[in-house]
Image (cartoon, rainbow, N blue to C red):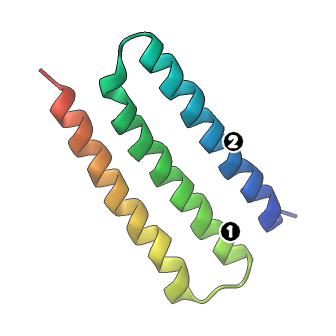
Amino acid sequence: MLAPWMLDLVMLGVAAEFAALAWILYRLRRGRWIAPLGWFLLSGALLIGALRLSLSGAAGEVIALPLAASLVTHILMLRAVWKQIP
C-alpha cells in the first residue's frame, strides 16, 4: 500500500532532479531554460502533494489548494516556454 512518507521521498527526488538539471543547464549555458524547468517540476510536486493529502485523509477543500496551485504553475511554465521560442 502507498504510504504518505513514500510520496515525501518522491518529492525529495523531484527537488534533487531540479538541482541536478539546473546545474547541467547552467554549465551548458542554457540557463534560460531553468525557470520553465522549475515551474514544470513544481507543478508535478504540487500534484504529488495533493495525492499525499488525499492519502492522509485531508478534506476535499484542502486537497483542492495544491491542485489549483499546480494549474497556476503549469500556466506559468507554458508562459515561460513560450517566451523562449524565437
Q: Nearer the viewer, residue 25 or 7?
A: 25
Query: In which quadrant will I find the C terminus?
Result: top left
Location of residue 49 by image quarter: bottom right
Kindly identify which numbered label has been placed on residue 13.
2
Q: Nearer the viewer, residue 28 or 69?
A: 28
The structure residue drawn at horizontal position 17% and vertical position 25%, both measured from the top left corner, is 85
Mark 2 lies on a secondary structure that is helix
Q: How far across and how far down the image is residue 46, in percent? A: 52, 60
Q: How far across and how far down the image is residue 27, in percent? A: 46, 12
Distance from Cα at disc 2 to Cα at disc 1: 15 Å
Q: Given the image, on which type of amino acid does mark 1 rest?
A: Arg
Examine the rendered structure and indicate whether residue 30 appears above or below residue 2. Answer: above
The structure residue drawn at horizontal position 49% and vertical position 27%, both measured from the top left corner, is 22
Dot 1: few (<14), some (14–19), or many (≥20) neighbours within 10 Å?
A: many
Examine the rendered structure and indicate whether residue 3 appears above or below residue 74. Answer: below
Taking 63 as reference, is 9 left or right?
Answer: right
Taking 86 as reference, is 63 left or right?
Answer: right
The structure residue drawn at horizontal position 74% and vertical position 78%, both measured from the top left corner, is 56
Examine the rendered structure and indicate whether residue 25 appears above or below residue 81. Answer: above
Q: How far across and how far down the image is residue 45, in percent? A: 56, 54
Which badge, 2 or 1, comes first in the chain's sequence?
2
Q: Given the image, on which type of amino acid does mark 2 rest?
A: Gly
The structure residue drawn at horizontal position 39% and vertical position 70%, both measured from the top left corner, is 68
Q: Which residue is mark 1?
A: 52
Taking 55 as reference, is 68 left or right?
Answer: left
Mark 1 lies on a secondary structure that is helix
